[in-house]
Image: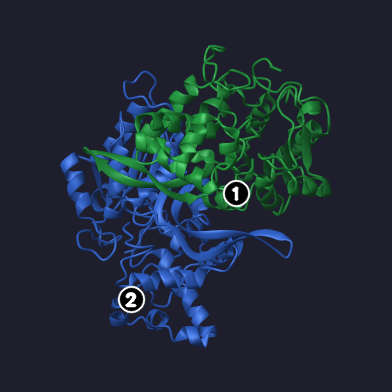
Chain colours: A green, B blue
Amino acid sequence: MKKTLLYLTGLALVACAPADQDSSSSAAYPSGTAGADVISNPLPSWNEGPSRSAIIDFVERTTTAGSPDFVPVPERIATFDNDGTLWTEQPAYFQLAFAIDRSKMIAAHNPELAENPLLKALASGDKEALANVTEHDLVQLVAETHSGMTLEQYQTLVANWLDVARHPRFGVPYSALIYQPMLELLEYLRAHEYKTFIVSGGGVDFMRVFTEDVYGIPPEQVVGSMGETEFEIRDGVPVLVKQRAINFVDDKEGKPVGIARFIGRRPVMAWGNSDGDLAMLQYTMGGDGPRFAGYVHHDDPDREWAYDRGSHIGGFDKGWDEAVEKGWTVVSMRDEWAKIYPGEDLP
Amino acid sequence: MKKTLLYLTGLALVACAPADQDSSSSAAYPSGTAGADVISNPLPSWNEGPSRSAIIDFVERTTTAGSPDFVPVPERIATFDNDGTLWTEQPAYFQLAFAIDRSKMIAAHNPELAENPLLKALASGDKEALANVTEHDLVQLVAETHSGMTLEQYQTLVANWLDVARHPRFGVPYSALIYQPMLELLEYLRAHEYKTFIVSGGGVDFMRVFTEDVYGIPPEQVVGSMGETEFEIRDGVPVLVKQRAINFVDDKEGKPVGIARFIGRRPVMAWGNSDGDLAMLQYTMGGDGPRFAGYVHHDDPDREWAYDRGSHIGGFDKGWDEAVEKGWTVVSMRDEWAKIYPGEDLP
């Protein structure tokens, strides 16, 4: 994903039609497991093709004892962007949908906040008004809707939202829109003792609510954008309180910075889907020994979306050119994925 | 440990007598393993006593299926301060000794820097001059000696220093001065599927050079103070460059912040040795269910050091009072540790 500031480039927040909360009664979290045969029958939702072959070849080369490309277990670090790489990011980043729902509720109870032009625009869904929303507005919105509460309170709100919110196109919980082939890739890597990390421009406190259940990735292996927090003792209970100030934006050139800061090792493999991931892929490929860079290409308008160059979301221009030039793996979702989501694919 | 700013309270940097580099030819890194019998014969270097009993009781309660205090594996997070908790911090933080060696070398090659009063004081070892060193001076020193280089270059310097530097009292590599009983505790916890983390005021890039070899703690489980870094492509190679600006000080109230930011889960167990660790221990104990807070008390002047209240380093006043009041575990190094270091204890 590409997040110019904290979350998005600011346009086309038109995802926010009222969600149909009746169209699915499934649990918010799918199982996140790809099945037991992960080694004998790897990547079952990947069609035979160049990407599947490249992955299997790389993993076998780097994990077979005696191979010239063998990588010791502690160095087997694989990093994944989240939005657009592990789950859908259309028609808007899912975290933005959460922030919009929060701001509507807040506005309904705070007349003075309701006059805020951004809140009005978000509440109205008016495209022209939304087109005037600036990045600064959105950072302010995130601060407005998230700060002042404890980390635990915030994460309770996120968990509740994930339970009740439904995706505007598919009518299912957002967490049902993770990519089945990527789940299988995560499991396949872990079965070969790779440690899997998320490195996303999304908010780390937001993602950690669901990554363990949904992807099998524990909180301590999630790197993301973050605000400042402060330690307080409230009514005798030690808590962390979210602040308005932003500490770190884990996007573009921030991704290698986040990797060095949180992981402290250069990845052996990295996956993304946009120019926002390019620096992470460059950093990964810049290390010695075998390295793998993969891009998920959104070219399936029927089962998911088709977008890349010049898109308001997930722009994929420089990354595409570099991937082609350097022979990195670029996955065609349309041609190489037999299945998109863990449930039935819904056109 | 207590680090008022990045590294120390500023006084008594008298550790810096010329190191005797001939007195030991041992490798810089001890094995970091406590032996195979970690479950059947736990904590062999701990004397029978209240601390050993409390640890074993807690670990058994939290890891035995069916126990009312059972903690699921993913939530078994144990955090450890480093300086004074996992290794010696006397007569000065080891990272400071590194910074002093660096600054001497830099001063020798840069006449204008050599006029810097701080560098002069450090080079002279003059106690009165050292007493006037301010915290700001030291942050500047750290910036001066560490910034501008790539992360990999910096860590090569640290690794080399660990190979050649010798501790002024014991004449052994600094990494030989890790505490054998704490190594055994780390292994004992890991054998019970606890995930062990360092949460230290020390610099994260410094610690990650040795924590995996010395403690069996990989870089991604080390939380510490950190400067800003920037992603650059230098001569076609993607690198991270250390900057002068400080991003985060992982001390005192910063420790719970660091835990939330890097780990994303409240620990079940936490260990420290000073007031700098108190907020981490408070935060740990503030969670629901079984929690364990432990303090290492430096009361052994013969085999290590004795210091606590009012000490220039590792001040242990408020933490001591709270530990006594709340019945936290306080380990007497003198009485409860049969052995201090992995090698022979040296008076």
Tell me the quarter of the picture where residue B241 sits: bottom right
Say whether residue B269 is visible. yes
Callout 1: 10 Å neighbours few (<14), some, many (20+)? Answer: many
Quadrant of image for the N terminus of chain A? top right
Indicate the chain on which mark 2 is placed. Answer: B
The kind of residue on which mark 2 rests is Val
Relative horizontal placement of residue A338, taking residue A218 as reference (left or right)? right
Image coordinates of residue B109 in percent, x first then y, are 55, 84
- Are marks 1 and 2 in one subunit? no
Q: Which mark is residue B154?
A: none
Image coordinates of residue A278 in percent, x first then y, are 69, 48
Compared with A286, B66 (above or below) is: above
Query: Circle 2 sits on which residue?
Result: B133
Compared with B146, B335 (above or below) is: above
Relative horizontal placement of residue A110, taking residue B115 as reference (left or right)? left
Say whether residue B31 is visible. no
Image coordinates of residue B20 in percent, x first then y, are 44, 75
Indicate the chain on which mark 1 is placed. Answer: A
From the viewer's side, name the closer residue of A231 and A144.
Answer: A144
From the viewer's side, name the closer residue of A147 and A121.
Answer: A121
The kind of residue on which mark 1 rests is Lys
Compared with B334, A100 (above or below) is: above
Query: Circle 1 sits on which residue?
Result: A255
Image coordinates of residue B326 in percent, x first then y, are 19, 40
